[in-house]
Amino acid sequence: MQETNGKKPLRDRLPIITKISYSLGTAVDMWGLWLYPAVAFMVFNLYMGLDPRLVSIAVGSVRLWDLIVDPVVGWISDNIRTRHGRRRPFILIAGILSGLGLPLLFMMSPSWVDIKFLRAPLVFWYMLGINFLYIPIISAFTIPYYSLGNEMTPDYEERTSIMSFRSIAQKVSEVGNFFAFKFTTLAWFLIPETGKQNTLIAMRVYTCILGSIMAIFSIIIFFRVKERYYETVVVKIKKKISILSSLGETLRCAPFRQILYMGFAFQFSTSMVGALGYYVTRFYVSKGNEIVANSWTSWIGVAFMIGGIIGARVLAALAHRIGKRWAAVVACTIGICGFGGSWVLYTPNIIWLQTVASALMGMCHASLWMLHAAIGADIQDYDELNTQTRREGSFTACGSYILKLGNAIGIFLCGFIITWTGFQAWHLTPSSQTIFRLRISLASLPVLGLVLAIIFVLRVPITKKMAEDIRKKLEARRGAV
């Protein structure tokens, strides 16, 4: 194979335009899956007055439904054979449908809060029903999409490069979630009679815009990104893999379990406080001023994006020098500084300091998920060596299952944490005790999760040398891809 000045083989290197095109899919994932929980408490608790515990139950239940759907989608994607591959058809069709369906998540009336059905407000049941229809569609995009990322190259370093592009794109698209808060305060959505913003109408307009972009990005990915393993490896496998045996074999992979534990610890601990940052910004830093809080939340999102872009590039370079596992430890340490430092940096005295905490959190998020995915791709080679089967869909589904389980449990608890702090939506001047409990929860719970994440990632045995040896053995057995 042709080498270039001692660098990786030419066949292992992907064009930058391919990496960028693939990375566009993070916007579909970010807006289709994570916009809703990001704004749920703002829309349904603070604007519509729904009990925060019901908001948590609704959003958490949706995540539990997602847990059931993901393995099924992963299994179908692993077993399907089409002339366009086994991932790209899902990406095209489900990506377009998820973009068109995004505005439907907010197509309810504020009056539904006062209409009871089975002793719960009608809006609660709508939240459950519409999401139970939407989740299978977005899952049919995300599982094949992330599986595709694991198949784009067999090279240890190039995988990190791909994931760094994806992480940077994810941070850019995540600004869309933060900007939703600012968008709802635009003058277009002011209700003249009350002088307040019509948050629900604003979210409908906003999701129409984002949904259109999601559909366009899905089309670009379909035409610009190819499935590298499909022709040389996948189509030769005629035997269908049963869903139970596939999931069981995947979970028996010991290194994979360690990376799952790492992701769960981080996802669970940060999901518990996911909404608390906005509450602290609005009721402590901005002293209850909604316009100021929403404006600063947008800037927090920009800082999160910038931190994520810097973190992904710096940690990718660091991983090249010290290995992916130790780079992940550095990422966790940065996160500890960001979340723990929020106790000092979220202050009404110097309001912009909260963007520093957000930048550190963004560095942690982007680089940790980048390394999580890059290590996961190496683990899938390890599994193929031992089982002689490639099942990226099953690995992606299992990984997604555990991460979303952590997210679901965290979201369930988040509403109860808000209730524990003493916060009440109809009393928008929280007591000093409530503020203290909001701040201490934000500063402490993610730190505990990050410490556990460090412990688990160091237990993953795959080093760069081991990954390269595995690749040589695989190519000797089934040929290069």
Image (tube, grey):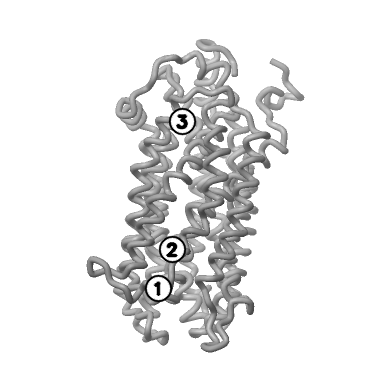
Q: What residue appears at the point 66 percent right and 40 percent down from the top-left corner? A: 220
* Residue ID for mark 2: 274
Query: On screen, 186 above or below 231?
Result: below
Q: Of the residues shown, which amino acid type is indicated by label 1?
A: Asn
Q: Is residue 481 visible?
A: yes
Q: Real-space Cα distance between discs 1 and 3?
A: 37 Å
Quarter of the figure with residue 1: top right
Q: Is residue 220 above or below residue 431?
A: above
Residue 116: image x %, image y %? 28, 71
Query: What is the residue that sits farthest to the right in this orientation?
Result: 5
Distance between mark 3 and mark 2 Cα atoms? 31 Å
Within the image, what quadrant is residue 384 found in?
Answer: top left
The residue depicted at 39 percent of the width and 49 percent of the height is: 404
Residue 345 placement (x, y as % from top left): 53, 73
The amino acid type, in three-letter code, at marker 3 is Ser
Mark 3 highlights which residue?
A: 77
* Callout 1 secondary element: helix
Look at the image and tell me in which quarter the C terminus lies: top right
Label 3 environment density (alpha carbons within 10 Å; few <14, some 14–19, many ≥20): many
The residue type indicated by label 2 comes to Gly
Gap in Å between the C-alphas at discs 1 and 2? 15 Å
Q: Is 130 on the left or on the right of 335, as rendered?
A: left
Q: Which residue is mark 1?
A: 45
Element carrying mark 2: loop
Q: Are marks 1 and 3 in contact (CB under 8 Å)?
A: no
- Earlier in the chain: of badge 1 and badge 2, it is 1
Q: Which mark is residue 162?
A: none
